[in-house]
Image (tube, rainbow, N blue to C red):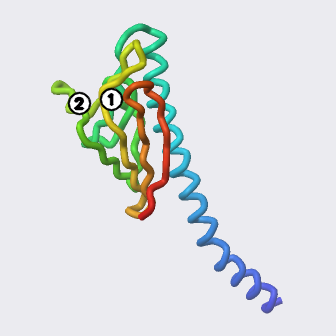
Amino acid sequence: MIVVVLIISVSVALVMPRVGTGWKRLEDGEFLQEFVDTIRRSRMIAVNSGQPVAFRINSADRVYDLTKPASRPIPENVEIFSERLEKDPETGDFLVTFYPDGSMVGNSFDLTFDHKRTYRVSINPLFGTVGVARLQT
């Protein structure tokens, strides 16, 4: 009986760290997909409504969204970098603005998870299409 308990304990000790890491990456992947989908949705809403739509990131409150104020949380293990974004003087949010013709004002984003894995979210300024690529570190 003791041998069986020992074998089970060793097996669990070997498997649990891998399961935990896999779970964390799954959560990171879900956040990345949700982030990209929100950017795509902003462009689609702008084209369909005929009104400019802003994708907002509030780095102080660690939230992003299309709404004002932004409300979707950015996980603590995620860092977002970008250059040349508009800044809303009223709220301090950083903006990517999509226009009804599908064009946009903004830039690409680098999302770094746990200071290890970095993904570039690129937005084509002419067509507004969004792509994701993992950067080598």
Upstream in sequence: badge 2 or badge 1:
2
Q: Residue at x 39, y 44 (%)?
A: 74
Residue marked by disc 1: 96
- In the structure shown, which secondary structural element does the residue marked by tag 2 occupy? strand
**Crowding near pointer 1: few (<14 within 10 Å), some, many (20+)?**
many
Q: Residue at x 29, y 30 (%)?
A: 95
Position in image of residue 35 (x %, y %): 46, 38
104 is higher (above) or lower (below) than 134: above
Q: Residue at x 17, y 24 (%)?
A: 90
Position in image of residue 99 (x %, y %): 36, 16
77 is higher (above) or lower (below) than 30: below
- In the structure shown, which secondary structural element does the residue marked by tag 1 occupy? strand
Q: Mark 1 and mark 2 in contact (Cβ < 8 Å)?
A: yes
Position in image of residue 71 (x %, y %): 38, 32
Kindly identify which numbered label has been placed on residue 86: 2
Q: Residue at x 67, y 74 (%)?
A: 15
